[in-house]
Amino acid sequence: MERLVVFGLLIPILTGCVAKPPKSPPANPGTSLSLSYPVLLVGDRNLVVRDDENSLITTTVASGLNFPQYSIIDSAGAEYSVVGVTEFGRKSLFSDMGTRPYQVFLELKRRGTISVADAKALTLKTALEPNGLTSGTAHGEEIARQRIDACQTFAQLIEACRKTWEWR
């Protein structure tokens, strides 16, 4: 009887150690989770707005868009991280200097819901990074603060971040 108890305890332990089969790669470009568009990508020193899924998943090497370095905030206030990128149709950098568009599949992880106040703080921090969007000028920093502080909704914040070159 004692052996049966021990064996019964070992089965869950042993089955938990079995390797999981590898995930099959995605068949098409897209996203693993549905997003409410437009979306705001918040990176180290960059803010990028994308209006729909096609514009989000279409990129070029020359754009420098390294998806895992960005947080994505959608217009409903959900925040996502990019945990994996699968490329479709990417050509050699040397064939076209990285200007040919290609598409990606983004494996997303939902972080939760972010408040408008927290999203504003995150975008302002990004805008004020040294050598970032405002180029470290007092004038640029003041413009960024005014534009971001004036936002009361995600839609307003995303719209304010659409033309960050005007903040310089």
Image: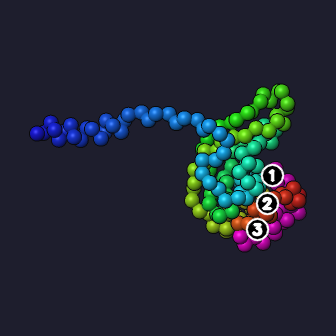
Where is residue 153 shown, x and y percent of the image? 71, 70
The earlier-in-sequence mark between 2 and 1 is 1
Q: Quadrant of residue 77?
A: bottom right
The earlier-in-sequence mark between 3 and 2 is 3
Q: In the image, is 5 to the left or to the right of 134? A: left
Tag 2 residue: 161
Tag 3 residue: 156
Where is residue 85 shown, x and y percent of the image? 65, 40
Where is residue 156 shown, x and y percent of the image? 76, 68
Q: At numbered mark 2, what does the secondary structure look like: helix, strand or loop?
A: loop
Quadrant of image for the C terminus = bottom right
Residue visible at 67% across and 54% down in the picture: 72
- In this view, the residue in front, 31 or 66, is 31
Tag 1 residue: 132
The earlier-in-sequence mark between 3 and 1 is 1
Q: Which residues are magenta?
A: 129-153
Front tag of 3 and 1: 3
Quadrant of image for the N terminus = top left
Q: In the image, is 54 to the left or to the right of 17? A: right
Residue visible at 67% across and 59% down in the picture: 36
Q: Quadrant of residue 151?
A: bottom right
Alpha-carbon span between mark 3 and mark 2: 9 Å
